[in-house]
Amino acid sequence: MLTNEGYDLVFGVNCVATCFFTLCLLPCLLKTPNARVVNMASEVHRWIDHVDYDSVVEGEKRRAMDQFANYGQSKLGLMLFSNELHRRYHRLGLMSVALHPGTIKTNCYKHKPAWLQFIVYLFMYPAKMGAITPLWAATAGEDLGGRYLLPWARVAQCESWAEDVDEMKKLWAWIIDQTEDFNPNIAQFRKE
């Protein structure tokens, strides 16, 4: 499925829309003391080492891409954005952090066969557990900016490709290129 704008639905929701929303809020965030941006990433970023920009729009590459790989690159893209946001603006008091909330029982498997739901749910945690790490990220007194967090409220090391400054800048520029027609004000954030 595609978004109305022509992006793969998973990448469009998990990465493009989230990053665009953050960029729209950025003027306010930069004026707010101790502002924080908490991004819901995923451990699947470890299995995808780059964002293939040709596969997130309609075309042969998107149709050939495995759904799991697409999900992984959507979360990697969000991590790259989160890390670039922190790199650019932490000196101005804005903290950005990415986290994996845990493997949580949600409705994401409701259309799968019952046997698969049963097996998958054996390894998942109740939905309320998914709030622990995001709440910690949003309220902790310590500086978690630029860090990657895991359940349950732990600092962890993300993969090196999620901290690759060239890839962070590339994703940042791509997001602005893709979305500035919807809000021309975000073009001001193109330059460092």
Image (cartoon, grey):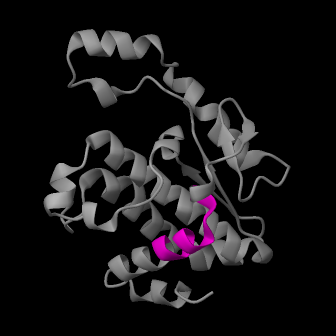
In which quarter of the view is residue 99 placed? top right
Q: Is residue 99 left or right of residue 24?
A: right
| x, y percent for residue 19 | 46, 65
Direction from residue 160 to residue 42 in the image, left or right? left
Question: In the rendered view, does 86 fall on the left or right side of 72?
Answer: right
Q: Which residue is drawn at 44% across and 60% down?
A: 18
Splitting the image into 4 quarters, where does residue 122 fall? Answer: top left
Q: Does residue 101 appear to the left or right of 178 in the view shown? A: right
Residue 1 visible in image: no
The residue stretch that appears in magenta? 162-171
Whole-percent x and y of residue 135?
A: 67, 40
Query: Which residue is farthest right?
Result: 142
Q: Is residue 131 visible?
A: yes
| Magenta span includes 168 | yes
Q: In the rendered structure, does residue 36 fall within the stretch colored magenta?
A: no
What's the residue at 55%, 85% (across, down)?
A: 189
The residue that appears at 50% across and 27% down in the rendered structure is 103
The residue under the point 53% across, 39% down is 43
